[in-house]
Amino acid sequence: MSVHNLSRLFAPERIAVIGASSDPGSVGGVVLENLTSGSFAGTVHPVSDRHAAARGIPAVASVSELPKPPDVAIVCTPAATVPGLVRECGEAGAAGVVVVSAGFSERGAAGAELERELREVAAGFRGLRVLGPNCLGFLNPGLGLNASFARARPRPGRVALVSQSGALVSAMLDWAEEEGVGFSAVISTGNMVDVDFGDLIDHLASDQQTQALILYMESITDPRKFMSAARAFVRSKPIVAYKAGRFPASAQAAASHTGALAGADDVYDAAFRRAGIVRVDAIADVFDVAELLARTPRTPRSRGARLAVVTNGGGPGVMAADALLARGGELASLDAETLTRLDAALPAQWSHGNPVDLLGDADGPRYAAALETVLADRGADAVLIVLTPQAMTDPGAVADTVAQTAAEARKPVLAAWMGGPAVREGRAGLEASGVPAYDTPERAVRAFMDLVEHGRLQGVLHETPRSLPVRFALDRPRMRDLLSGLVLQEPGTLTEVQSKALLEAYGIPVTRPLVARSPDEAVAAAERVGYPVVLKVDSRDVSHKTDAGGVATGLLRARQVRSAFAAIERSVAAYHPEARIDGVTVQPMATGPGQELIVGARRDPVLGAVILVGAGGTAAELLADTALELPPLNERLARRMLESLRVWPLLQGYRGRPGADLDALLEALMRFSYLIADCPEIAEVDVNPLLAGPDGVLALDARVVLEPGSAAHAPLPYWHLAIRPYPEELTTTAALSGGTPVTLRPIKAEDEPLWREMLAACSEESRRARFRGAVRITHEMAARFCFIDYDREMAVVAELVEEGRARLVGVGRFVADAERDEAEYAVLIADPWQGLGLSGLLTDRCLEIARSWGVRHVWGETEAENRRMLAVFRRHGFALRSQPHEGVVYATLDLS
């Protein structure tokens, strides 16, 4: 249901407290006191069957007795009473319920059953939203509203805090009070029977007071919703997350190398990177980043890691530099003009470089002159001001001067006022002036690098991949028949032959093994494929063939083949006495140069399928040189995975050794991504080794583990993926009025060059009509329109081939709200192809897709003079409403 009714829940006018009491020691008493002792201007109703009044306010026995339905009811009664009370709230017409009561799934099987009942009750009322149970409640400081049992009253601010831990909320509110940091919202999620992280991210994305979001997470309930919401939020505002539970006490045995290498916490890392979320590993860093986000509302987010350090002590400057370089940052290189200006403003003994050491007697004007000069240097992305309380230092006066200079800065300015009582007042003055201030340079640098990481991740969201030639036709019905046959006939682990058949069906080059049941068959197979050959044990029960002595390589003659066959049987039987040995596989030995890689996938129980690539071969686990990513992959994502590996220089070519064919390797990774997306039955898969050489790639071994029946009751398409892949199935063909064939297909990130060419073919009038004014087509804008979330938005492009090359000639787009209830529609046709019926074709297709999504209302707007668009709206049944004073016509269509 997403954001439906969340505005009423978190900005209510009428609140009912069920279980209200005058007892200051009870939860109901604390909640009622918090609601009534603040500046909340709404109405608060105590609900109690035990008290006639609470805190002097008349009480009613049940929610049904209230004069009007409450916007939100806060339940503070024992867990066993909660499902019935939530039912009463739903029947009374409440918009939301906050269940602070504990005693649910966190208390074992009986509590879990009670939570299941609560979830079913809540689902029975369309529009009723439930926060919790087992939560602290929420605070809306802008309304003076404390709807929780936390005692703190934070000031209004620009950062929202959403936490799965109520204890952390209390700690952070206490810290914020001491530091003077404010919040736009503070929400404790509890067990999330209804309102979850995805809902709250969507809600806060539309909140103008929220400019940044901090998440404390222990688990995700709906990964697809979470990823969509987070990716949309991060396009304009940062998210910082602390994920608890990094090291589970026990790990399940894995049937593949991938299962051993891809830990659950690594999968969360991959998900956060894909969503653009900055992850911090220490709770102290959450506080530091919160301060930086809260203190710099006017400062553009840093996209560079080049930091200039201004200090009155050489040692602290070195500390800052060490911390910066350890986190992958860079000391800004000051240009000649900056050095000349600093020479004129500073004593002759200054450090003449970065860090800029002002010497121990530096006063406010000296700090100000250095800060102003360094901020003007194009090589510095941000400045850190460090002060130590030396004999001639006035920390308060320096802080005032720094704050005045920083107020005009267009780059982030951070401060580290080192020490205790002597600098406390100066640090407080900086904070009050909006300059994030820390007690050590290291803490300041960590916060700065998290800000840099946010900028880097935003850049990734706007990257456009190259268009690789991976247009291969997949006979998906045949693929499903093949896979279904394997699932029915051979559940569990597939043989090497079967595993490679799946890879080959998706266009990944493989060595084709021949199965030999006896030494004679092995010799015949070796002579058929040609020496040298490799023998591998053929057994479903042996996961790691080399460990079991089940591999023999470099065999050059029949005698060696016979000997290797017998040795493999003896070795595997000794290693795994219960293993069923069906013989061996025989295949030609790859002799060319290349780097051994492992490519694999496994299904995470929370986040679904995850793809792994890394250094492969028998030492894969030992090297642990891997990168993880969520499918689907495009060229940029696949390349980024490879670039993060320590073996990346070897893939490029190193010391005379030839590099790999990177295009072939990237294509293989993308094809592998298609395989994982199309086959939810795959629980684990290893391709190890995948030989990447100058002449292409070759899968030398493969092992696929199937989970029969896992897709039998799929709740939605691609249910096993956290991100909806490219909807290739929506591609269709049509013809313009003159008969020219045109392909209608969803847009993709690789279309950016073609999309920009299409806009270049549009007149200024056409662009103005589409975008409601003059627009400057930047890469960021183009990436935003081409790189979309197919769960929430659809853009259908019209592609035709002209003089041998593809060209986009039009695009229809609808953007749905988070619940897919309403959608905004627009269409753009390049001028040379207007008047050929393309607007109608695109509109028909977009409305057809919107109906399949369950969208009930579509709306759009156009200028009153745009007769062609008005005609399209009329032909498709839109109701038109003119706004003459705006020169705009609004169009609405009911699809329900």
Image: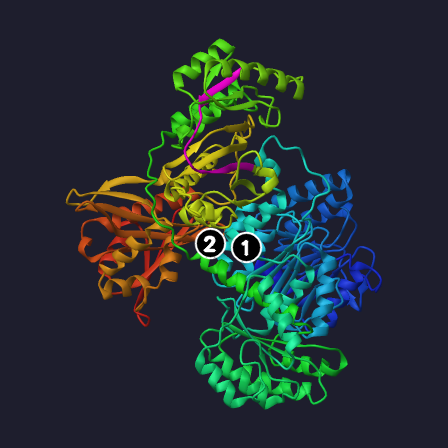
Lower position in the chain sequence, tag 1 or tag 2: 1
Query: Residue 316: percent from the left, percent from the top?
Result: 66, 75
Q: Vertical placement of 817 versus 264: above or below?
A: below
Query: Residue 557: percent from the left, percent from the top?
Result: 45, 16
Q: Is residue 282 left or right of residue 643?
A: right
Query: Residue 93: percent from the left, percent from the top?
Result: 62, 53
Q: Is residue 201 left or right of residue 882?
A: right
Crowd rating for badge 1 (residues with CA inside 10 Å; few <14, some 14–19, many 20+) = many
Q: Vertical placement of 765 versus 232: above or below?
A: below
How many numbered markers are drawn? 2
Residues at badges 1 and 2 in contact (C-beta under 8 Å)? Answer: yes
Magenta part of the chain: 583-602
Q: Is residue 265 left or right of residue 423?
A: left
Task: Find out whether residue 414 is within the magenta segment.
Answer: no
Residue with the mark numbered 1 = 3
Q: Nearer the viewer, residue 595 or 77?
A: 595
Residue with the mark numbered 2 = 817
Query: Which color scheme did the rendering employ for the protein?
Result: rainbow
Main SS class of the magenta portion in the image: strand
